[in-house]
Amino acid sequence: AEAISVPSVQIAELVKGAFLHDVGKIAISDSILLKPGKLTVEEFESMKTHTMHGIDIIKQSSWLTEAAEVVRFHHEKFNGKGYMEGLQGEEIPLNARIFAVADVFDALTSVRPYKEAFSLTKALEIMQNDRGIHFDPAILDAFLTIAAVLYAKCHTATDDALAEELSKLTQKYF
């Protein structure tokens, strides 16, 4: 968001959404969330409902409503083939388009129950292949200019150092 000069107020909303984007997964069965293999069609349909469960949760507190765009739309795809609403291109709120890039990068470069972490090179290759399909090309291009630095920070720093960095970054916006 900073790399594309998003206003501070909007970045604050993005930060809230980033923290809460998957809150709706508390309504999803652990047998699905922790499954080591590929999800069945039925399991994936259940998983997709986490966005709407998330909206149901955050609408209970007025101070969380600014997170709604990211919570609801972070699985939309630039080509319109995402979920839950099939939004396309700039119909997808900017913060959701920004977060989609960060979320996928994190998923690719992190260990998950169903996969090992990919290298920076492999993760960026996968993401570049989804330019204009999953990701807004302009946002992905901006991310690619900072990805290596972010990756190095996240994969070499201690947990305490990362927590301190996160605290500094969030204090800029709250």
Image (tube, helix red, strand yellow):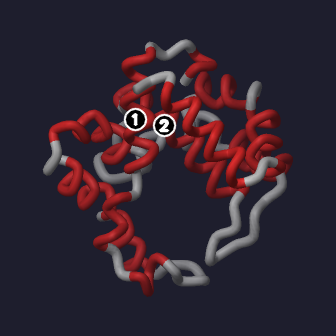
Quadrant of residue 136 in the image? top right
Quadrant of residue 2 in the image? top right
State the image coordinates of residue 31 (x, y, percent, origin top left).
44, 86
Real-space Cα separation, disc 2 to disc 1, in angstroms = 5 Å
Which sits earlier in the primary sequence, circle 2 or circle 1?
Answer: 2
Where's the N terminus, which quadrant?
A: top right
Task: Check disc 1 and report its element: helix, strand or loop.
Answer: loop
Please name the residue that numbered disc 2 is placed on.
78
Left or right relative to 114: residue 121 = right
> The residue under label 2 is which amino acid type?
Phe
Crowdedness of circle 2 by 10 Å Cα count: few (<14), some, many (20+)? many
Q: 154 or 1, which is in the foreground?
A: 154
From what the image shows, is residue 144 above or below residue 75? Answer: above
Mark 2–mark 1 CB contact (< 8 Å): yes
Please name the residue that numbered disc 1 is placed on.
88
User: Residue 1: which disc?
Assistant: none
Q: 133 or 155, which is in the foreground?
A: 155
From what the image shows, is residue 80 above or below residue 27? Answer: above
Q: In the image, what residue occupies the spot 69% across and 60% down?
A: 110
Crowdedness of circle 1 by 10 Å Cα count: few (<14), some, many (20+)? some
State the image coordinates of residue 84 (x, y, percent, origin top left).
31, 52
Task: Check disc 2 and report its element: helix, strand or loop.
Answer: loop
Q: In the image, what residue occupies the spot 72% across and 55% down?
A: 109
Q: In the image, what residue occupies the spot 63% across and 19% down?
A: 3
Left or right relative to 155: residue 98 = left
Q: 93 or 62, which is in the foreground?
A: 62
State the image coordinates of residue 9 (x, y, percent, origin top left).
37, 18
Where's the C terminus, which quadrant?
A: top left
Q: In the image, what residue occupies the spot 42% across and 45% down?
A: 74
> The residue under label 1 is which amino acid type?
Gln
From what the image shows, is residue 148 above or below residue 119? Answer: above
